Amino acid sequence: MSNANRIGADAIDQYMTEVGQHARAASRIVGRAETRVKDAALLAIAAALEAAEETLRAENRLDMDAGRASGLDAALLDRLELTAKGVRAMAQGLREVAAQPDPVGEITGLKYRPSGIQVGQMRVPLGVVGIIYESRPNVTADAAALCLKAGNAAILRGGSEALHSNRAIAACIQQGLAAAGLPADAVQVIDTADRAAVGALIRMAEYVDVIVPRGGKSLIERISREARVPVIKHLDGVCHVYIDDRADLDKAVTVAYNAKTQRYGTCNTMETLLVAEGIADRVLPALGQMYRDAGVELRGCARTRDILPGVKVATEEDWTAEYLAPILAVRVVRDIDEAMDHIAVYGSAHTDAIVTEDYGRARRFLREVDSSSVMVNASTRFADGGEYGLGAEIGISTDKLHARGPVGVEGLTTQKFVVLGDGHIRQ
């Protein structure tokens, strides 16, 4: 892998072709590996990460210093930083994936047909998964874990801003693979910052089965536009909380505050608050003061500004904005129908929540809002693989095919039909 730094740009295509060929060969070995072998690799990687904590953090500091010098914004620096807690979290994530059931080989829906054969579906690996991501070095460990558990080979291409961190994590992954007797090529971390490597990876349909981009909107738009390989993606996290006029006020305030302020730079953070006009006078003053105390800038519709003097005017662009910052758009709506209409027009199909005590309205919201996660009386910040019991996640998909929502181990497999007979022939 380190050879990539020693070759010229004109050899990137050749380098990436070799990576793809090696990944395809490794995928056949990983795909048939027993669960105990895959789990042994994951546990060995976790131990290697913990043992290398000082090295990992030292390498990460190099990336952080370079990021500050190059002017990375606060949100990107937050994603880039690898703390002691972050290293422990990576190791724990690997152990949680190891503890999960192995989906590979599971047969479901087995039924007898009139001919006497049995037909069912078996869950199988996708094959080779290419993952392109920015900033967050923990993705390197998370992606390796999920791909291995699902029986896939992985080609990981992190951002140039995390190059030192990713190299150090890759070394731990290689230790774990070797300890379990799995091929080194089962997880390959692209060791070059050359953007041409991305272009080559997303065109290698003969070697790569799916691409998962994790990063900014411009990266994902580029991947979606240029890829010849199927893509699992989401472009924006324009998440909403709608406070219904039959909401419990304490719940409404707690959920709406947490959905925005628990962490600003994540795709499941609320970016637009919708409030039913029948409850706006009672809920917005308290929330407005809490947001101000937290340093959140509010941008609101005319009715919001009547209730909260001094709030900035919300423009049309604010309704589609993914701020990833302490900024919140607020709109007072007539009722649940207008709230759902707003979400349908301006939302990104990521995560949307309703706060209400009305069972019927909650059911309508769950059924009619077409997002990958829809919630009742809960913060949008729960839209996460770990919180859903998936362990580490490869990302969140707002597509409808082939995976939707947080993509865990099962999302990195597919199904094939299997037929059981006993000498049956078709008449």
Image (tube, helix red, strand yellow):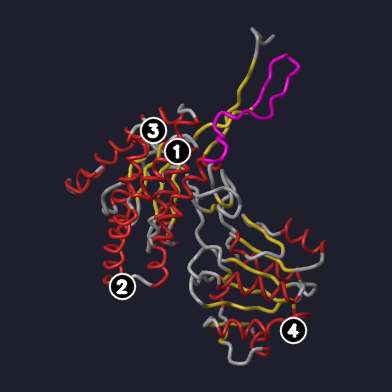
Q: Earlier in the sequence, mark 4 or mark 3?
A: 3
Q: Earlier in the sequence, mark 3 or mark 2?
A: 2
Q: CA distance from mark 4 to mark 3?
A: 60 Å
Residue 138: image x %, image y %?
A: 41, 54
Q: Earlier in the sequence, mark 4 or mark 1?
A: 1
Relative to 216, say whether 252 is above or below.
below
Residue 363: image x %, image y %?
A: 78, 58
* Magenta stretch, residue numbers: 99-120
Q: CA distance from mark 1 to mark 3?
A: 12 Å
Q: Secondary structure at mark 2?
A: loop
**Identity of the residue drawn at 69% across and 9% down:** 427
Res 61 → quadrant: bottom left
Q: Nearer the viewer, residue 168 or 419?
A: 168
Does the residue at mark 3 contact the one at mark 2 (Cβ under 8 Å)? no
Residue 120: image x %, image y %?
A: 65, 26
Q: Residues within 10 Å of mark 2 (few under 14, many from 20)?
A: few
The amino acid on which the numbered mark 4 sits, given as a three-letter code, is Arg
Residue 15 magenta-drawn? no
Which one is closest to the eye, mark 4 or mark 1? 1
Residue 100 magenta-drawn? yes
Q: Which residue is mark 2?
A: 71
Q: Which residue is mark 4?
A: 282
The amino acid on which the numbered mark 1 sits, given as a three-letter code, is Leu
Q: Which mark, by number, is residue 148?
A: 1
Q: CA distance from mark 4 to mark 2?
A: 42 Å
